[in-house]
Each structure stands twice: as C-alpha cells, then as structure tokens.
Image: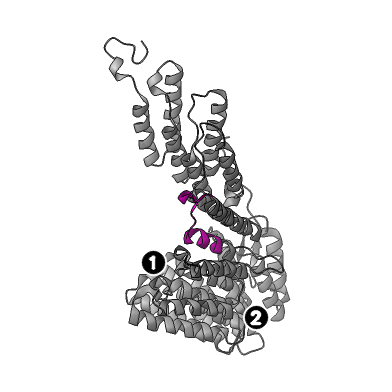
Amino acid sequence: AEWGQRPGMEALTPTVYSFSTVINAYANIGRPEKAEAVLRFQVEQYEAGNESARPNAIVFNTIVKAWSNSRTKGREKRAEEILRHMIRSCSKDPLCPKPDRITFNIVLGTYAKSSAWGGSGIEPRRALKLLEQMEELDKKPGWRTKPDAITYLLVIQALGKERTLNASEMALEVLHRLQRKFKETGDAAFRPNKIHYNAVINGFANSRLRAGESNAEHAEAVLKEMLELYENNQYWFKPDRISYSSTITGYANEGRPLDAERVLGMMIEEYKNGDARCKPDTIAYTSVINSWAQSGEQGAAQRATEYLHQMEKLSSEHGEDVKPSKITYGCVINAWANSGEKGSGEKAEAILNRMEQLYEAGDRAVRPDVIAYNMAMKAYSECKDENAVARAEELFRRMDNLHRDGRYSMKPDVLTVNALIKCWINSIDGDVPVQPERVLGLLGNMLSSEETRQRPNDETFDLALRLLLQSGDAEAARRVEAAWTKLKGGRGSISSSSKYGAISPPRPPRKDKNK
C-alpha cells in the first residue's frame, strides 16, 4: 500500500509542515540540492492526491535561500531558475505558490553578495531587470511583489559588483528612483537612508577607470548630496565613517593623495565637532597612505611613512581604531618600492623589520608575508644603491630560512626571483660579479617546482637573458633562450651538470605496461 494508505497509518501522512522541517534542516547545513530533492518528493506527494503536502511560498523561499547561502558555483543561476519556475507555474496553475517580495529579495541578495560575476555567468544588471519585474507583477491582482527599501539596496549593491562607471551611474539612478517613490507616496517602505548612499559611493570608488572620467569625483558628489540632505534637516542621511572612507578609497585608487587627504580632513573635522561616527579608522588612514604609494609624486614615500608614524602614535594614545594593519605597513613598503629614491631599499626593509619585531612581540596580525618581502625586494631592485645586491640577497636568504623553519608561505616565488635578477642587472657596471651558474641554478629550481607561483614567467626569462647578455656570457644566454622556447608549452629542467647547464626537454608521458 502507498504511504498513508495502510490501516491505522493515516495520521502519519506527511504534511507541508513535515516537508518544511526536513527542507529547512538541509538548508541550515548548506545542502540545497538535498533540500530540492525533498521538495520534488513533496510535489510528487501532492500530485498523487496528498492535499496536505501542497507546497507553499515559504517552502520555495527556503530552497531559494538555501542556494543563496551556499558556496556552490552557479548558486545565483539556480536561485533565479527556481524563481522563474514559480512564476511559470503560477501562469499554468493558480493554486501554485506565487513568489513574493521575500523571494525576489533573496535572489537579489544572492546577486548583491556575489564576489565574482565573471565566474557566475550572471550579469549584475539582471538585478535591475528583476526590480522592474517586481514592479510589473505588483500591478496584477493577487501578487505581493511590491519592492521596498531593502529591495532597492540589494539592486544598488549588485550593480556595484560590476565595478564599472556605467553600472555605478545606474545604481545612483536606482537610489534617486527610490527617493522619488518615497516623496510621492510617503510610504515608509520606500524611505532611503545612508546605507543606500554608502553603497552607491562604494560602487563609484571601486569602479574601473573610464577615460576622461574620475570615479572618485562621482563618489564625492554623492557624499556632498548626503551633506546637503543632512543640512536640510534630513538627519538620517548624515555621512559616517563608511561614507568618508569609501570616498578616500576612490581617490586612492586614482593616485590622488591630496584629494584623499582633503576628504580625511573633512572626516577629522566632523569627529572633532563631536560626531563619533566619523572617527577616522585604520581603513581611512591606510587609504590615504595607499594614495601616496600609488601617486608616483616626489616625496610620496616619506609622506606615507609620516602617516604611518602618526597612526602608531594615535594608536598608542587612543586605542586600536587607528592601529596600523599588515596592509598599512605593506602600503608604506610599496611606496618606497615605487619611489626609486636613493636609500629607498633600506627604508622599505626598515618597515619590514618593524613588522617582524611587532610579530615577534606578539602582534600576529602584522606578520609580514611573501608580498611584503617581495615589495622590499622590489625597492632594492629599483633604487640602484651600492649595497642593493647584498641586501636583496640577504632578504632572499631570510625568506628561504623562514620557509625552512616552518613559515611555509614564505618560500621565495617568481616575483622574488625577478626582483633579485633586476638587482644583479643593475650591478653589472659595479663591483658585484654575476655568475651564470647562479642564474641557471635559480631557473632550474623554479622549473622543478610544482607550485605555480614558484614557476618562472616571461619576465623571468627576459631578465635572465638580459643579465647574461649584458655580462657578456652569450653562450649561457643562448641556452636559457633555447630552454624557454622548449619549455614554454611544457615541463623540463635546467641542470648544472655542465659549465652552463644542460637543457633537459619535457619527458614524454610514461606508457602504462598493463594496457
């Protein structure tokens, strides 16, 4: 007999609440595909005559939310597919559960928190189309898809993920549309707030640059709009720390340190006037430092260092809100690496040593990584100081020793080697001799590595060839060039069995004797 048809078993027939409980359990442990399987069984039960198992909107919303919260690739697509299925089913059977505002908001939330649109195959502007569909469906009898302020916020955040100026301009228009709806209807559900504005500012600040345009200026224009609304007694729009920090980030991304400093000054002034929500923090100061690091202006590295010292002083006096982070120190090291000034290598290494000292003293948050060391190596490769080669080689050895001592992520990578070879190139006219065996030895070690970041790239071979040719060792250069030609599409090694190293071509795959 079918389930529930055995004598005395009628009371055990599963209901919508039974299915909902199991579906919710699978959703809570991140198994949306299992939750969907239970839903399919529920639909089968309903279609077989079990009226008490009829799925409702809550069940479908749970499934959509399960996909939204999962880490499964393509979760955005699947969440929208379920939404589409609900809409199609309603057109065929009026008894099917209709998607509501919650359903749409869950799907929009999936778009808004997606970190990589290219990998998902979903365009952020799909969110804008869903908003328009919600507005159209809400006009029909029996549909409850009227967007609210949360809906508009999710659309704005989704558009921000595209990181283009066009999408950010669309996000601003969505915000203005929400404002108009609130003004026209007086409905509190349409009332925007500073979170909407901050999302728009963040979108502009992190958008890719477009020729002849300044994303940061667009971001600051939105910030000024917030200030105007606040001055007109709409106090809920008063800019906060996020508003100012995001604008500063915009100028930092464009390498405009003076503008970044100006906005930081506005932030500090608001804080001094009693608004604790505008207290500058680590992010704000680090963004200003980064703006100097990216600017390429004369004295930029020194200015970045001064801000670092200011942060350390403020941190010791007023708490950890402005405590320099690993990123902060890294930006200062990068500033010196980009400066090319005399002594910049030593200045960069001094910051690196400061990070190591803090880490040894117990501050694990600032433990320098391979990126910090590589930037210090880059500083030596650009400064052309007399001791640059010796200091770069010492940093290289230090990284290798740290790796051997258990800090496995500190193994020198392709960027480390490239910086070291640049130092050798710069020393050719000096007193530091360059031995071809050392170059070939480095390349051999890299080619034998199974890790991608340790493998040589085009720049590695280009630098090695330049070094060997400038040092007058044409034979070694020819061998390196031949190795690169052979190995570009495969695997192989450079051995040191001969004077310059013998080229070993990629080995053919071993045949299986059992076949």
Q: Residues within 10 Å of mark 1 (few under 14, many from 20)?
A: few
Q: Number of numbered discs present?
A: 2
The residue identified by callout 1 is 406
**Of the residues shown, which amino acid type is indicated by label 2?**
Ile
**Of the residues shown, which amino acid type is indicated by label 1?**
Gly
| Residue sitting nearer the eye, 175 or 291 | 175
Specify whether residue 474 is in view.
Answer: yes
Above or below for 5 versus 495:
above
Q: Which residues are magenta?
A: 185-202
Whole-percent x, y for residue 398 in the image: 45, 76
* Element marked by disc 2: helix
The residue identified by callout 2 is 425
Specify whether residue 378 is in view.
Answer: no
Tell me the quadrant of the picture where the N terminus can be found.
top left
- Relative placement, left or right, of 296 versus 93 is right
Whole-percent x, y for residue 22 in the image: 35, 32
Q: Is residue 189 magenta?
A: yes
- Relative placement, left or right, of 509 versus 18 is right
CA separation, marks 1 and 2?
A: 32 Å
Residue most extreme to the left: 8
* Element marked by disc 1: loop
Q: What's the residue at 43%, 84% (across, down)?
A: 310
| Residue sitting nearer the eye, 414 or 372 | 372
- Relative placement, left or right, of 379 versus 212 is left
Whole-percent x, y for residue 132 in the image: 60, 44
